[in-house]
Image: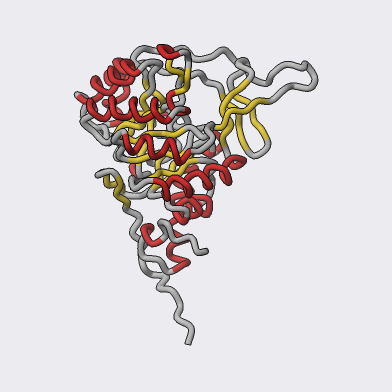
Amino acid sequence: MIIQPDMSQVPDLTVEFAGIRLSNPVIAASGTFGYGEEFERFADLRRIGGICVKGTSARPIDGNLPPRLYPTPSGMLNSIGLENIGVDAFIRDKMPYLRNAGCAVFVNVFGFTEDEYAEVVEKLNACAGIAGYELNISCPNTKHGGMIFGQNASSTERLTRLVKKRARRPVIVKLSPNVTDISELARAAEDGGADALTVANTFLAMAIDTDTFKPRIHTITGGLSGPAIRPLTLRMVYQCTRAVKIPVIGLGGIARAEDAVEYFLAGASAIQVGTASFYDPRAPLGVLDDLGKFLKKKGLSSIRNLVGQMQQ
């Protein structure tokens, strides 16, 4: 006798990682969802698990000159230049709205020196309504010859340890994919005290206009995101979940529920939706709705039934 799955069952989509409990595992990725309020008229923010706001620095940054975006096959190049209003204005002008958004709020933090990271985190510590900090370690350390924090294991561990000592909330380290062995960087972040990882940031890439012979974006190179990178970041999530004991959040080219499911099967505890929000501001909700349908179709009672369950 064939046993049919119970289609009436409502799957449990709640997740918990790093001491943070979310109503569901779908988080809007940093740099793709603004400060949340820009998307309010398109999507009910109370329904998604969380928002990771755009990178926040010690002082305001104007960003790079245009052109700063360019569509590529199955993806997008960007070189925004970390434009943001700075931590003081963020706390004053953006957090009042975010505190009432109805979902978890993660603040992406970056700096060009270790002291700048610490300064931002220490100011955010006194601000209510934040679930955790996501460290963008894909920035050049201007005090040490411009070396990218996240491309060196010792720098990654040292920066993570410094921030963790000062942080009053969970610290999630967002790893760069532009490394030889991402597992090494994942272990370094864990050794530094990271509570979780986001895997991964954008891939360094470029495009050239064959009519003008000029680069498609002003800074020549930029970050590649979108479905084109999903197989690469999926592999990295798989590697990281086997290299560390802390939770991993999967990010890279997720536009459908099935994309998210791949990340869960590879071991991710939650996922972030990024580039898809540029062409569909309801993308996080679309992924969430179809994720529930996927679980019901498979007769699974919880999203946790998928985590790390890739069959070999």
Residue 175 in the image: x percent, y percent? 44, 34
Residue 244 in the image: x percent, y percent? 37, 46
Q: Give the image's coloring scheme.
A: secondary structure
Question: Image height check: is 72 above or below 57?
Answer: below
Q: Residue at x 62, y 36 (%)?
A: 75
Q: How many numbered marks, from 0 up?
A: 0
Quadrant of the rendered image containing residue 48: top left
Q: Residue at x 43, y 65 (%)?
A: 296
Q: Residue at x 36, y 25 (%)?
A: 109
Question: Image height check: is 2 above or below 72?
Answer: below
Q: Residue at x 51, y 38 (%)?
A: 181
Identify the residue at the far bottom of this view: 1
Residue 14 in the image: x percent, y percent? 32, 53
In this view of the protein, can residue 277 be seen by the observer?
A: no
Left or right for 117, reference 276:
left
Quadrant of the rendered image containing residue 170: top left
Identify the residue at the far right of this view: 211
Residue 6 in the image: x percent, y percent? 40, 73
In this view of the protein, can residue 36 be seen by the observer?
A: yes
